[in-house]
Amino acid sequence: MTVPPSGSALASQDRDAGARVLIVDDDIALLRALRVSLKARGYEVLAARRGEEGLELAAERRPDVILLDLGLPGIDGIEVVRGLRGWSSVPIIVLSARHQSVSKVEALDAGADDYVTKPFGMDELLARLRAALRRTPSGPEDPRVETEEFVIDLATKQVSKAGADVHLTPKEWDIVEVLVRNPGRLVSQRQLLHDVWGPEYGTETEYLRVLMARVRRKLESDPSRPRYFRTESGMGYRFVP
Amino acid sequence: MARGKLRLYLGAAPGVGKTYAMLNEGWRRKERGTDVVVGWVDTHGRPQTEAQLRDLEVLPRKPVAYRDQTFEELDLDALLARHPELALVDELAHTNVPGSRNAKRWQDVEELLDAGINVISTVNLQHLESLNDVVQGITGVVQRETVPDGVVRSADQIELIDMAPEALQRRLAHGNVYPPERIDAALGNYFRTGNLTALRELALLWLADRVDEELHDYRERHGIAGPWETKERVVVSLTGAPGGAVLVRRAARMAMRTKAELVGVHVRAEDALTGPSSEGLIKNRALLDELGGRYVEVVGAAVAPTLVQVARAESATQLVLGATHRSRLTEFVRGSVVNSVIRASGGSLDVHVIATDERGPESDGPEGAIDATPRRRSRRHGYLARALTSPLPVRRQIGAVIVGLVGFPLATLLLAANRAHIDLSTALSTYLILVMAVAIIGGMGPAALAAVAGFLLSNYFFAPPIHTLTIADTRDIVALLVFLVVAGGVSTLVNLSVRRSSIAAQARADAHMLARVAGRLVSPLGNPLPDLLEDLLVAFRLEAAAILRRHPEGEAGGRADPRPASGTGFVRWDSAAAVGSDPPRTPEEASVAIPIADTAVLALRGPELSGEDREILAGFTAQMAVALDSQRLQAEAADADSLARANDRLSALLAAVSHDLRTPLASIKAASSSLLSEQLQFDPEETETLVRTIDDESDRLSAMVENLLDMSRLQTGSMEIRDRAVDIGEVVSSVLAELGPRADGVGVDIPEDLPLVRTDPVLLERAVANLVDNALVHAEGASPRIEAGAVAGRVDLRVVDRGPGIPPEDRELVFRPFQRSGDTASRVGVGLGLAVARGFVEAVDGDLDLEDTPGGGATLVVRLPAVTPPETGAEPDPAIGAPADPLEGRSA
């Protein structure tokens, strides 16, 4: 993950500052390291070592984002996600040593927003945290998304690459819009299918593959090594501005 | 004045609620208007028990001074003076302080009873004099205070306060029995489930007055050595005849009465392949099994001596036989097994002859099978030739001669007396009958003799001129010659038909044997090959038999065969099954080798085999080929199965290992990437926190790798163990030193006079370090404690934590490596620590168990064998320094 383009970096940093992060993990050493680093970044840090404790803290202190380990003593991390989603839409980033995508998909389906696999670099975690926090309602959004290679105008539904207009089919536009409106955030396959094709779709992941390949051919300079529209194998897709 | 009544509450172990029950009963009686006084009560500070005192009148205790100390005792005089209707006196077994009126409290109670006061008291099982040593053997706790059994037995009422071991352990765990700090190694050991169960049973037995009968078993089960007579054995002779069941049952009853082992013996005639009534025998065997008997089958020429031999070998004192149902004549001819056994027993064996009601046909009589007189047969001939030429048993021949010796003179006398009414032909006919009788009993030889005798007798007595061997009339000569020819012919025919029936019996036996072989093969249990070979050994009187399999890789196999492979080039053989003495290991070592399948050979050593025998063997080998085949298939299936399971275990292990390694790695990576991040700035204190995290977690990672290596060493058995006499205190000190400041709060309680243990100090240290580490992780604020104590020839080291504890159903799980599902890091799933600890402790011949900490938490108990003082070769040399204060090393 690269540092966001200059200009927006400072703005986002300001926005992060003061946000309240709840970390639920049973490993004391990791809690200690995360607490120090997130504090240095200006976050207010809450910590819980058990799932039940995490749920209580979430209800009492209303954190802005939750970092949640899946393997917890007492109730399991997935149960915590389900418990939170019962009443809260707070962004949840799952921290997991589980490399099997099955448990990650389970967590995402249960309502988690993103996941980071242990061990992770602190910069990556901070970027994901920012992405998750951006998702929360924070005033009128900038309808223009500019990258080094293309510009997307969400208001006029126009896309241009190197000055020339790029034509996107309605479905291509839909998928690009969903991803671009959630910059840096993982959007699950299920959600994309649901948003683009409709509520009755959820498992037809091959549609997504075909569509994403077309989008990349139109927008990426090297479609086989996508820079902006990244695939998270088995999970979903992520727009990295 | 009438003597008071004594009511006793008997408990199998402390804490079952005797005092509670006593107070409760006292209070109930008081409610009914009885004048009740508590003479003495020990509530041991148990709150529920104290509550039972309610408003009962409690007699003040009497202070007694002894050796500068003041003790409290039951104030007997005051109690006698108070003279209540009912006195409650706790702890009947208590020993009074020297100088008291009575040495024991039970004597005080006797006085109270004599004074007409009713008494309720309590006593524990371990205080009963007759059981004292047994209880000590079970629990390892020495109990000096005892009550004579007679005192307890003379109580008017004894009530057992019973409690399930699990319930008592729960009470103990909740601190309802002893304050938690009092639970030391000895007490912890006392309350193990096995001990409590044994004590409870013992209490019930004692109440039922059956201890004497069962105590023996207790001692055996608990390995308590004592001057107990060696086990008796009752041998019952099994024949498979009807009525055998009666025999077996009677013998079983005898065995039960004398605490003897029951052994059923079937003597198979030496050259009979099977007895006449195997169905009956199978039934007898089943019954024997049911009654707990052991079955022995032996082959012997004569039943009686073989039976006695077996009985002697089993060191039996009783031999049970069925009574014979034979006619006197048969007995006379065949001899009586019963008499022979009694003669052979020589007086050292009690022979019981049991009458059985179920009378079978003669040949199936109770002695039928065991009396099957050996049909001696030549091993060099086939069945038919064998049958025709071999003489009948000597006994039968002698019988025939006796019949002749008696019959001929008798007949001659009778005939001569009536000479007036008979002629030569009548005499010849009479003699012919005798010849036939002799032929039936004795076969050819005796019959020929009888024919000649008949010829001579009729010639001498009845062919004129009488009383000479000359014959006047040619018709008489012809008649006599005809007699000879007819007699010879008849006896040959009779003989042949007797032989034929014996051949038929033989064929039946062969068929039966093959049927049995087939039955063994279809039986799903175990390996049928050794049984098959055993059958062969018996049937063909072989010395040894083996089934050899060609080694699949020939010479390529790793094991070098020191013997030169002669003849067959470089083929090597594996023995699939072997019986007998020194069974052949290669086909060349056998006297007969018969190929079974392409890759196996039946190798036999013993007398040469006839054509017929070989035919039967062919039947055998066909069956063996099937058995070998199914064995191979089973082995392959098992291999595939175990490979699959090993594969599953391996992937589970890999997942677990990668998870456990990744956890500290995650902290290291988070801390190091934070330090490197351009987005983050840290003050010096924060920087140190991060660097320390990296450092700690690196240690954790390397400890984990070390445990992994240890685990694999343990599993491959490549751990080197160096035993020596070790001071537990020193081990604990160095463990604490190694753990550093983390272990500062760990409490240590190790007596200085603790015996040394024989163990490998390095391995023990690793094990204890893992246990303490585990306790620290789960202590949840409260510091763990390390305690040690000597118990029953062992030293128990207890690592006590006050964490959340471990539910009973997970107790064994925590000792398995990586016992956690996914990355659920609950208490079940401490990765390798406890698995390695148990591996080490077991490697040094110790045990590692998990118990509840009274009041909550887990206690891990390492039990190690103590070094007995004489063996203490490595006793601390005073020059080097007496065993140091176990805490000394730690504070350094």
Image: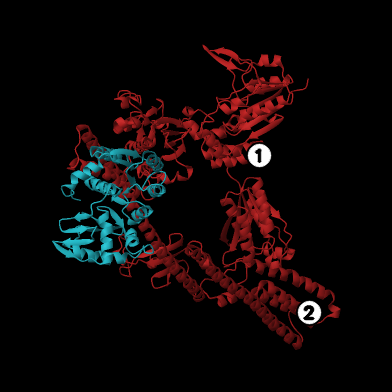
Chain colours: A cyan, B red
Q: Nearer the viewer, mark 2 or mark 1?
A: 1
Q: Nearer the viewer, residue B585 or B215?
A: B215
- Residue ranking furthest to the right: B420
- Residue ranking furthest to the front: A156
Q: How would you rate the neighbour count of disc 2 (Cα within 10 Å): few for under 14, some for 14-19, many for 20 or more?
A: many
Q: Position of residue B242 (x, y in %)?
A: 69, 63
Q: Secondary structure at mark 2?
A: helix
Q: Chain of mark 2?
A: B
Residue type, label 1 = Arg
- Residue ranking furthest to the bottom: B474
Q: Is residue B699 above or below residue B565?
A: above
Q: Position of residue B648 (x, y in %)?
A: 37, 57
Looking at the rendered structure, whether the residues under marks 2 and 1 are on a common chain is answered as yes
Residue bearing the label numbered 2 = B427
Q: Is residue B713 left or right of residue B321?
A: left
Q: Secondary structure at mark 1?
A: loop
